[in-house]
Image: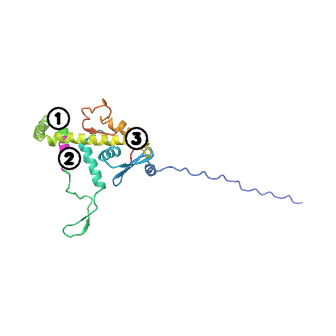
Amino acid sequence: MKTPQLSLLPPVQSPAPAPRLTLSPTHALAVSPYRLCRGHGYWQLTFAGQDAVLKHEQGLAYVAYLLLNPPAEPIHAVALTLRSQAVRDQAHAATEVVDPATGKTVPVPNDAIVQERGLGLDDAHAAWALRRKEQELEAILDDESQPGPVKAEVERELETLYKYQKQHPWRAGDAAQKAADSVGKAIKRFYHHLARAVDTAGNPHPVLRPFAEHLRQHLLIPSGRCCARGGPRPGEGLAGCFTYDPPGGVVWTA
């Protein structure tokens, strides 16, 4: 009698582990909990992952620029005005115009310069350029490594600059001061609108009021624009300047 032969079954293989999913940097940006995006007449706000819609106002444009472009050091109101205006103009720039000679629609080149500006912006730009030049010359004068002939030439340039400022105070100091006052008032007005915001039931708005407190702590106070009486005042190097100092982990996207 033959002994039956046993056949060995192949060993059962364990299933391969499922691959781990990771979020790419692009996807991480897409779900940013801090977002501020401008539409036509309104802004879409995402603060700490919660959404709200804001009506456009000038103070919001200044705030948006600071949040989306946190400066390494405080920037003057004139620079803030010009930069936020440049962003707005770029976003709403026309891509086609009508040629008055032919009546045909032609595309506008990317590097085209449109000769149409507000007189206030021109004055602000001139005042800011004047101030930057003055700071550059004063820095050279304070530099001990600069030779005597260079400092003598710088002193002559500064004397000419100071004389011009004295003869045209509105273009120099007054324009910069008016810009600082205007920007400060616009930002504070926007902050107060947020701080008093209510929802449809008349309750404190769950998104806008925390956003207002965020701006108070990280924009108004660092800029020396605290709304409380007796609060911090702008220091000598901060007068007329604005900044945004975001807490750790807060990065705004458009």
Q: Amino acid at mark 1?
A: Leu
Q: Which mark is residue 125?
A: 2
Left or right for 64, reference 142 = right
> Considering depth in this image, is 127 or 38 the residue closer to the camera?
38
Q: Which mark is residue 174?
A: none
Magenta segment main secondary structure: helix
Q: Amino acid at mark 2?
A: His
- Would you call the spot at circle 3 few (<14 residues within 10 Å), some (14-19), or many (20 or more)? some
Tell me where residue 232 appears, x and y as whole percent: 30, 31
- Residue ID for mark 1: 141
Tell me where residue 145 appears, x and y as whole percent: 19, 34
Identify the residue shown where x is 49% and y is 50%.
23
Residue 135 seen: yes
Q: Which residues are magenta?
A: 119-131
Label 2 – label 3 distance at C-alpha? 35 Å
Q: Earlier in the sequence, mark 1 or mark 2?
A: 2
Identify the residue shown where x is 37% and y is 40%.
196
Q: Amino acid at mark 3?
A: Arg
